[in-house]
């Protein structure tokens, strides 16, 4: 065998060995692993990652070799596998696996030419990369389209020396790449970057300037061997006074952030000076928004030493500064700030008191309870109202109750709201006890509170108030009895209703009787109290008694109402007809129809027929039975208005018989339109209803089509008619 032939065979064997080695990748074939992605379960996914790592860096690189540029092939399985692997390898206690994956991905990053694939690999290194990545990622920073992903990877890794990798790249970067690097150096708070950033902060690039200023504010002072470099602050100070209003405002806020860095460094005096500089800048036209931020930062930097400045701002004529300083003071812990705030509550102007009290309303602050209590008696109603809103707990409730006797009408509403919020069941007797010493206006509010809280234990107090000389108090008490009384008090409540001569009080007392009587299990028992007094009651209250009987129910009550329908007095007849027409159960249907048939008052007949139709519609009877009842009602009705109501009810009876009944009214000029409209709904399909298809419906539909004036409705009838077979 000649030497050239031998050499050629040797190279072929070596190439074949490399291919086999890459395919097997450390005795692990990656193709089956890729086929299992995405895995069905987390356990299966982790098993795939473990098998891949067993194959060593060659296996990971083999998967990386499957990555393809966008549009050049399907690599979703490879990307899914590598993405999960990077996260898996970064788990605690797996440093060797993390390093294996990181090294393999770095090697792939070195070899691959496509920038999109490089960007993807850099994204993986954010998870599994470590200090070993600094130099390779530093190389990537030389490529403009890799600056962003490489920088984000370096920030995620945060290995010592990261700033030293970023800073050289900044010297050559331009545009967006430079902005990315500047932001990263600021996020790292890298003091060595200060000289370069100071230069950029004074440069002409409108995007780099604010980024550099922000980074300088984050970094703060730069400690040198024998001195401290405050050039970052000097650059920010200059920026506060140059550029347009927006740039100045941004620089001023960044200067305040620098003040916080000074405080962290231990240079509190310098930080305070910065805050006072910005306060002074806030005095310029259009810059007032800087002052609240400066005051807040001053408090953060100096702590209690800033209190004199804050108190001065609180007492300034600028209300924005005043309220802002007030809230800053409130957020500061310590006796000194608490003392300053208590002084404001004691002697400050009304607008400050209100602002502070409003701020205290959301928290229970015992340190201010004395000053708050004093403001409850302030001469200004707005201050008093704000003080009311700050009260909490039992002590707060006691203060609210003390205020009730002297409160104005507006304050009473505010007091009621907060008493209802604070009081629980065992506090109700204390609230009721205030009734005796309160004026009428306050008594009304107290009774409403007892009513809303269903203060059954206080019913004796409420009954006593029902006998008050003040009509408003009596009315409020009678209303309150509906929720505070029990069936045992029904005789007293009925006596109150009979005794009163005021219609509104009678009505309120009877409403309360109904509310309490409804808890009784038997209908006859519920109505018993009313029926007992009805025969001997005055005519005026008899009408009201009849009006409540439908809610109480029972056969005896129904008979009483029925007998009164034909009584001699108009007021009683009117009340009886109204009660019968509103009767809730089916027992009254026949009585309604009988009364409607013989009654001469057309208004009364209309009420009864409408009540009858309501009961039939609610009855649940078969359509045939309902139709028969409606026919009876039509026979009793004298006016077209009532007949229209009855015909309208036929819309629920979708039968041929109902359609034929409607047909009888197509010749009546007054009822034709109503009958035709209802007939369309009975006969024609709508939604899931398929309509009447009996051939016997055809004659009626033909007549309907001739009567209906609305063209779309007529076409609907004709269309349905076309689908019905002729007899």
Image: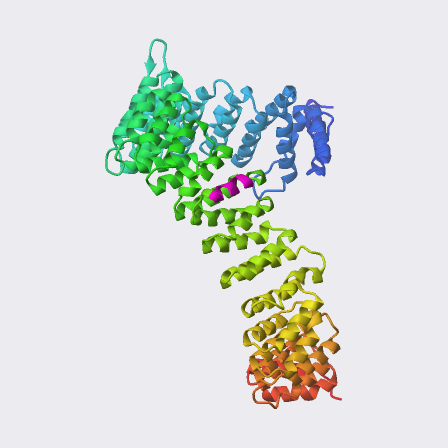
Q: Count the marks: how many?
A: 0
Instruction: Residue lying at the far top in this picture: please name it.
Output: 226
Q: Nearer the viewer, residue 45 or 484?
A: 484
Q: Nearer the viewer, residue 59 or 156?
A: 156
Screen quadrant of the N terminus:
top right
Q: Is residue 653 visible?
A: no
Tell me if residue 550 comes above or below residue 567 in the rendering.
above
Answer whether residue 596 is magenta in the image. no
Q: Position of residue 651 (x, y in %)?
A: 65, 76
Q: Nearer the viewer, residue 335 or 185?
A: 335
Range covered by the magenta-colored residues? 428-436
* 441 left or right of 205 in image: right
Instruction: Residue lying at the far left in this picture: please name it.
Output: 284
Residue at 62% x, 74% y: name it. 564
Q: Position of residue 366 (x, y in %)?
A: 45, 28
Q: Nearer the viewer, residue 328 or 421?
A: 421
Classified by dominant secondary structure, the portion drawn in magenta counts as helix
Tell me if residue 335 comes above or below residue 533 in the rendering.
above
Q: Position of residue 627 (x, y in %)?
A: 71, 79
Screen quadrant of the C terminus:
bottom right
């Amino acid at each position: 065998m000649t030497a050239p032939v031998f050499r050629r065979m040797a190279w072929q064997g070596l190439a074949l060995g490399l291919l086999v080695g890459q395919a097997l990748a450390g005795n692990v074939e990656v193709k089956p692993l890729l086929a299992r992605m995405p895995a069905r379960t987390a356990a299966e996914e982790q098993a795939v990652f473990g098998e891949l790592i067993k194959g060593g860096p060659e296996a990971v690189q083999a998967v990386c070799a499957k990555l393809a540029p966008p549009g050049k092939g399907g690599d979703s399985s490879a990307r899914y596998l590598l993405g999960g692997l990077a996260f898996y390898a970064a788990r605690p206690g797996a440093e060797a696996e993390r390093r294996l994956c990181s090294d393999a991905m770095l090697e792939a990053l070195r070899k691959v030419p496509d920038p999109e694939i490089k960007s993807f690999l850099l994204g993986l290194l954010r998870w599994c990369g470590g200090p070993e990545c600094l130099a390779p990622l530093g190389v990537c920073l030389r490529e403009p389209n890799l600056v962003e992903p490489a920088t984000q990877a370096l920030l995620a890794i945060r290995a010592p020396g990261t700033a030293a990798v970023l800073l050289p790249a900044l010297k050559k970067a331009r545009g967006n790449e430079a902005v990315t690097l500047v932001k990263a150096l600021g996020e790292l708070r890298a003091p060595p970057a200060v000289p370069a950033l100071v230069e950029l902060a004074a440069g002409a690039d409108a995007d780099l300037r604010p980024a550099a200023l922000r980074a300088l504010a984050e970094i703060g002072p730069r400690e040198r061997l024998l001195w401290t470099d405050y050039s970052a602050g000097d650059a920010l100070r200059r920026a506060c006074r140059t550029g347009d209003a927006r740039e100045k405002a941004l620089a001023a806020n960044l200067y305040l952030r620098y003040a916080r860095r000074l405080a962290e460094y231990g240079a509190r005096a310098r930080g305070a000076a910065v805050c006072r500089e910005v306060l002074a800048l806030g005095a310029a036209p259009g810059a007032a928004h800087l002052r609240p931020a400066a005051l807040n930062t001053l408090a953060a930097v100096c702590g209690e030493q800033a209190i004199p400045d804050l108190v001065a701002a609180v007492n300034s004529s600028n209300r924005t500064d005043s309220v802002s300083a007030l809230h800053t003071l409130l957020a500061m812990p310590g006796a000194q700030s608490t003392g300053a705030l208590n002084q404001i509550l004691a002697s400050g102007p009304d607008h400050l008191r209100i602002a502070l009290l409003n701020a205290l309303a959301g928290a229970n602050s015992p340190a201010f309870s004395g000053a708050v209590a004093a403001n409850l008696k302030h001469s200004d109603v707005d201050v008093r109202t704000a003080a009311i809103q700050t009260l909490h707990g039992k002590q707060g409730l006691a203060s609210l109750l003390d205020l009730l006797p002297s409160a104005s009408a507006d304050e009473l509403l505010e007091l009621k709201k907060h008493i209802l919020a604070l009081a629980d069941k065992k506090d109700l007797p204390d609230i009721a006890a205030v009734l005796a010493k309160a004026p009428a206006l306050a008594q009304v509010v107290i009774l409403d509170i007892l009513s809303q809280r269903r203060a059954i234990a206080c019913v004796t107090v409420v009954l006593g108030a029902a006998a008050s000389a003040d009509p408003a108090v009596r009315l409020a008490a009678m209303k309150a009895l509906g929720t505070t009384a029990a069936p045992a008090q029904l005789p007293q409540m009925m006596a109150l209703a009979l005794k009163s001569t005021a219609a509104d009080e009678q009505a309120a007392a009877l409403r309360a009787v109904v509310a309490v009587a409804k808890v009784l299990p038997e209908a006859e028992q519920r109505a018993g109290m009313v029926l007992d007094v009805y025969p001997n009651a005055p005519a005026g209250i008899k009408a009201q008694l009849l009006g409540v009987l439908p809610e109480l129910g029972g056969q005896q009550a129904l008979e009483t109402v029925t007998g009164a329908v034909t009584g001699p007095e108009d007021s009683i007849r009117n009340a009886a007809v109204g009660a019968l027409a509103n009767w809730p159960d089916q027992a009254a249907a026949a009585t309604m129809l009988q009364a409607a048939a013989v009654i001469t008052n057309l208004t009364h007949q209309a009420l009864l027929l409408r009540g009858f139709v309501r009961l039939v519609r609610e009855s649940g009877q078969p359509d045939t039975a309902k139709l028969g009842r409606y026919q009876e009602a039509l026979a009793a009705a004298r006016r077209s208005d009532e007949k229209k109501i009855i015909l309208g009810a036929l819309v629920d009876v979708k039968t041929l018989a109902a359609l034929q009944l409607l047909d009888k009214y197509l010749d009546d000029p007054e009822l034709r339109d109503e009958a035709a409209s209802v007939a369309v709904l009975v006969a024609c399909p709508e939604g899931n209803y398929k309509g009447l298809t009996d051939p016997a419906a055809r004659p009626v539909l033909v007549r309907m089509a001739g009567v209906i004036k609305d063209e779309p409705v007529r076409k609907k009838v004709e269309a349905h008619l076309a689908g019905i077979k002729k007899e």
